[in-house]
Structure formats: C-alpha cells, structure tokens
Image (spheres, grey):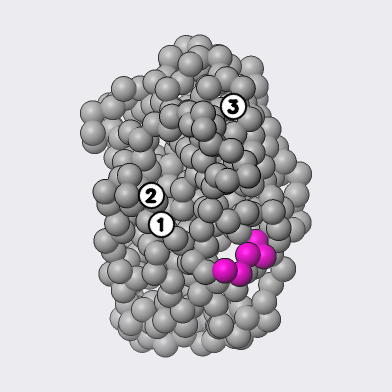
Amino acid sequence: MRYLVTGVAGFIGSAVAQRLCSMGHEVVGIDNFNSYYDVRLKQARVQRIAHPALLVLDCDLVDQKAIARLFLAHRFDRVIHLAAQAGVRYSLDNPMTYADSNLTGHLTILEGCRRHQIEHLVYASSSSVYGLNRKLPLSTADRVDHPVSLYAATKKANELMAHTYSHLYGIPTTGLRFFTVYGPWGRPDMALFKFTEAMLAGQPIDIYNQGDMLRDFTYIDDIVEGVVRIQDVIPAAQPDWQVETGTPATSSAPYRIYNLGHGQPVKLMDFITALENALGREAVKNYMPMQPGDVYATYAETEDLFDVIGFRPQVSVEAGVQRFVDWYLDYYGQTMQGKVAAH
C-alpha cells in the first residue's frame, strides 16, 4: 500500500516510515524540518532509512494548497499523522506555534482524508490529555476534560476534530495516546537526552517535583510495533453506541482511541538510576518543584489495545536506556566516549 507519514523526520515518524518500507509498502514522508531542535538530527534520521520505497518531501502542514496537491498527486491508501509541535514547556512561551501545527495542521490532514477516501487515518494523541485525572491507571474510558498545558489541549482538540470527521464523512480514525516515548534517535528536549548530555558534561540534572514522579516509559520499538499493528485494525461504525452508556474511546462513528504505553509505570529516580548504570557514573542532582504543565504520574491502561493487536511492549527500562546510551555515544562520536572513559 501507499502511506503518507507526516513528521517523517521526527523521532517516531522516522522509525514508523523505516518499518513500513521494510514491510514492502510505499511511503511518502513529509516534514517541515523546523528549528525547534537540531535540524541535523532530523536530517540524519531520514538519511538512515535510505530506502527506495521512501519519498521525503519538505512540506508544512499549514500550507493547505501544498497538502491538497500532495493528496491529489499520490493517492494514498492510508495516513499515519505524527507531525506536531511537541513539548509541554515550550507551549508556555510559544502558544501560537501549537495552534498552527497541531490545530490547523491536523485539519488539513483531515480534509485530505475526506476528499480522497482514505481507508484509515491513524494519528498521534498524547497521554498529556489526561491532565488533572488522578485515577490510575489512566483509561480511555475516562473523560479528559481538564488539560494542564496548551499542548495537551491541542491533542484533545485533535481527537474531537477526528471524531467530527468520522461522524460527518465516515472516515475511520484511530488516535493513539503515546506515553513517554524514549530510545535511540530521540528528541533533544526530552528528559533522557538532556540528562545524558548534562551527565557527560559533568553538569547537574534538573529533577522536578523533588524526584517524586511516575512515568510510563515506552521504548520506541514497542511504539512502532503498536502503530504498525493498529493501522490494520480499521474502526467500524457502531450504530447502537450512545453517549450516555458508551465509552468515550469509541462512537457510533468509525472512531477509536487507544493508550499506547508500556503499562508499567516507573519511578523517575529508578529511571535515572538506569541511566547512571548505563553511563557508569552518578548524576549530580538538582531537585526542583513541579513545573507548570507537568503531571505527577502517567500509567496507561492498555488492555483494550493489546486485545486487538496481540502485542505487549517487550523492552525494559534498563535495556532501553542502555540502547539509548549506546546510540548517543556512537552518534556524537569518539570524543564523547573519551569523556566517559576519563571518568
């Protein structure tokens, strides 16, 4: 089949595109290669795929005419929409960027799917939509009406927009609420990347909420496996579903929401210990209060997803962190390895 993968130069998008190509599919990947973080890392992610079935285009989701031409030219069978402006803290200072990428961009993709009878749209939501919810594990059966960051609000809006298009036009849509994805080729603004960089430089790491936090860390390969499997599970309309008695994760329309996480929350301090073991050095810790937009715990209830895809995440935090460190040292070269050896 022919896929559109948005955010193809991103952490998850590049890994999904690589997997689809290896399975024999054609992939058109788009990205705007913005400067939110090092563009060279984005370019390197794309270059590592190096597959004849992948066509990469520099294209911005907010360019409605360009996206319309894209759909018209390539006649996609399915769309995996992973492009977004990521990051909770960045949204505090740059709110309009999130409106452009995450709202207008999502709408242009929905419009493309509507006009070209796409058989399945899979898109990235986020565990951040749970906001002030405190009942654990976090379940798609629960309402998510109280986000605590603009990023989270845009992701909730994406789910609502997808439902509208599923209802009005019969487009099958599946939203995946990703839980704390980590691993090789990750984003430099994420904790694991920042901790590793600081520790190798002998600098302290900032630990929020005095280290008292839980995260459902999910390794990138497990995320990709979930994405690739769920795109074959196309939602069907459920005419008997009702708002009053049905779960918010489904609908009378061909619409579905799933959590995609490991399902085993890890204490932040245990995650840091795994990194210390992988690097062979102890972190200098700078304990700080909870930051605006953060939540205390993420813990995914995942049984509904695992029931339909027949897969559970396989990679432990210890193994995943070690793989990240091995990649980081290799990617940033022998100079960095020398710094570690010196300590």
Does the stretch in magenta take in 331? no
Q: Residue 337 location, x and y as percent?
A: 33, 72
Residue 199 vs residue 246, the one in the foreground: 246
> In terms of sequence position, does the residue under pointer 1 or pointer 3 come before the other?
3
Label 3: how many residues lie within 10 Å, few (<14), some (14-19) or many (20+)?
Answer: some
Residue type at mark 1 is Thr
Q: Which residue is mark 3?
A: 167
Q: Residue at x 57, y 20 (%)?
A: 169
Is 71 rendered above or below residue 58? above
**Residues under numbered marks 2 and 1 in contact, where contact means CB atoms less than 8 Å apart:** yes
C-alpha distance separating marks 2 and 3 = 22 Å
Label 1: how many residues lie within 10 Å, few (<14), some (14-19) or many (20+)?
Answer: many
Question: Residue 305 — which label?
Answer: 2
Residue 22 in sight in this render: yes
C-alpha distance separating marks 1 and 3 = 25 Å
Q: Residue 152 location, x and y as percent?
A: 65, 53
Q: Residue 110 location, x and y as percent?
A: 58, 26
Q: Which residue is mark 1?
A: 302
What is the span of residues highlighted in magenta in the rendered image? 131-135
Residue type at mark 2 is Leu
